[in-house]
Amino acid sequence: MSLYKILIVDDHFVVREGLKLILETNEQFQVVGEAENGSEALPMIKELHPDVILMDLNMPVMGGLETMQELKKQGSSIPVIILTTYNEDDLMISGLAMGAKGYLLKDTSRENLFRNIESAVHGETLLSADIMDRVIAARPQEKGTVPSQNEANSLTGKETLILQAVARGLKSKVIAFDMGISERTVKAHLTTIYNKLGVDSRSQAVAVALERGILDI
């Protein structure tokens, strides 16, 4: 059984301790460090090499989005799962576009926390229905409501269906079964979608498609 190292970055002690207590009930996860902000977290990330980072958005000194930007500059491939609350919807699309592997409400269930971490470790993005509803609701209506002809035609019908399924949080295996195609074909379509949209992850593809008005969920 693999052991996955987790770094928790949140300025609230109670949140960090709560997550740590939950994670310690699963022998697959080990909390290797805690930080109060991104500035404190960056050197810890270099030293500890966590497998997954659980990161708050709003923190003093250096917030989650700024920290993700710095990690991207450094070429880090460590998956980040954003910790969010109900009053931070305006930051969601930005986080997705920057490659966050998922969003977790701070009061999420134990099972959902584990699922998200396992998905992130395996390079997948888990976007739950409630989170996607909030992302869509937070999308500025003036942006991309009328896509250009080129953008509207950039994805084929099948590619659009696959991306819609991804936005609903479905995994490649489930999408393949529902569409009557192989999982390998789904992944090939996803690669094509990434290339067309200029992204490199499921979360970025969904965010960009929403911003441009290509995806209507």
Image (cartoon, rainbow, N blue to C red):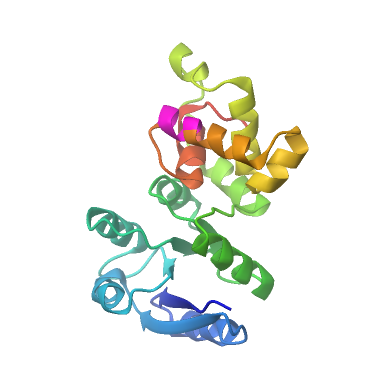
| Residue span colored magenta | 192-197
Query: Which residue lies at the image location 40% right of the left edge and 47% below the top edge?
Result: 94
In the displayed structure, does residue 200 sit left or right of residue 189?
left
Classify residue 42 by image quadrant: bottom left
* Residue 5 coordinates in the image, percent (x, y): 45, 77
Query: Which residue lies at the image location 23% right of the left edge and 58% below the top edge?
Result: 74
Residue 143 visible, this orientation: no
Q: Is residue 38 above or below residue 21?
A: above
Front position in the image: 174 or 115: 174
In the displayed structure, does residue 69 sit left or right of residue 184?
left
Front position in the image: 191 or 86: 191
* Residue 70 coordinates in the image, percent (x, y): 25, 58
Disc tally is: 0
Residue 56 visible, this orientation: yes
Query: Which residue lies at the image location 38% right of the left edge and 83% below the top edge?
Result: 33
How would you classify the magenta stretch by its main secondary structure? helix
Classify residue 52 by image quadrant: bottom left
Quadrant the C terminus occupies: top right
> Does the magenta portion include 196?
yes
* Residue 156 coordinates in the image, percent (x, y): 57, 20
Query: Which residue lies at the image location 59% right of the left edge and 83% below the top edge?
Result: 22
> Does the magenta portion include 13?
no
